[in-house]
Image (cartoon, helix red, strand yellow):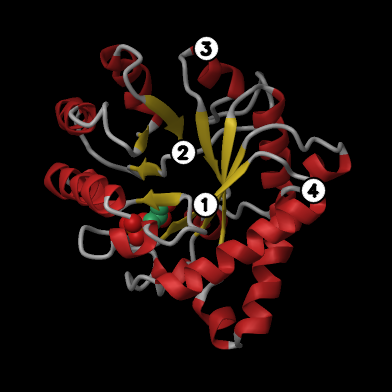
Amino acid sequence: MSKIFISNWKMNPQSFSEAEELLKSALKFKASNIKIVLCPPFVWLRDLILKSKNKIEFGAQNMFFEEKGAFTGEISYKMLKNIGVKYVILGHSERRNIFGEINEMISKKVFAAISNNLVPILCVGENLNIRKKGKKIFEKFVLSQLEFSLGKLIQNKIFNKEIIIAYEPVWAISGSGLGIADTPENAKNMISLIKNFLFKNGFKKFLVLYGGSLNSSNVLNFFSQKEIDGGLVGSASVNPDEFSKMIQILNKGLKNK
Ligand code: 13P
């Protein structure tokens, strides 16, 4: 199965013409071995989807768990579905830490996404303080984030729908963390642990990705681990040259595996 490269543009770029440039770089690889998903800011989503003419898939970076109503500033799953979005990033550490999102809220979002046929990309990962407490502690922390963020799916026994988990150690993220990638070894172990948790709880269709300072010099080291189903990539993927370089490296490097 081909690996998945999800590009989280975060709050970038600032103009639609730059967004179009990024779309163009991605469309060059539509026949690639790597599946590419683009997650632009809400304001660019609809026009990029129309421009892409179904040649690439899109995700949003967040959504609210209600369909409509008096929720100033929010975007509903129904709105995303109606413009052709397929994926939605939920529980990103930047939302947890800056906007106070908690597992209980994220669990409602994951449930609402799945119930409306959007594929959630649920982010989990420890911060530096927890990481420093040692392997047993940070592993336990990530599993508890997972358990609570998937709480409503587990309670309602929804195990047959596609879900994506991104293991993103908070400290490894560039911009909001230290910007130092984790080791492929730790990412691989954490991803095995997460897969084991999902399997034991009854989930049947899942992919588990790594995210945090992926770039053209390290991306192949992560993607070539068989346990790692792909990556959630931030800053390096909003630079068209670096984005193209990463996809080229992956296409070449993974073919030779
Ligand atoms: P960077 O690739 O910029 O470290 O961001 C990772 C991330 O947060 C993706 O969601």
Q: Find numbered disc 1 in the image and state the secondary structure of the residue it sits on.
A: loop
The residue shown at (43%, 50%) is 230
Q: Mark 3 and 4 residues: CB-CB less than 8 Å, in contact?
A: no
For residue 82, which numbered disc appears in the image? 3
The mark nearer the N terminus, 4 or 1, is 1
Cα separation, mark 1 vs mark 2, equals 8 Å
Q: Which residue is denoted by mark 4 in the rendering?
A: 151
Cα separation, mark 4 vs mark 1, equals 17 Å
Q: Which residue is denoted by mark 2 in the rendering?
A: 61
How many other residues sit within 10 Å of disc 1, few (<14), some (14-19) or many (≥20)? many
Q: Find numbered disc 2 in the image and state the secondary structure of the residue it sits on.
A: loop
Q: Amino acid at mark 4?
A: Gly
Q: Which residue is denoted by mark 1 in the rendering?
A: 92
Cα separation, mark 3 vs mark 4, equals 27 Å
> Is 50 on the left-hand or right-hand side of 1?
left
Q: Amino acid at mark 1?
A: His
The residue shown at (46%, 38%) is 61
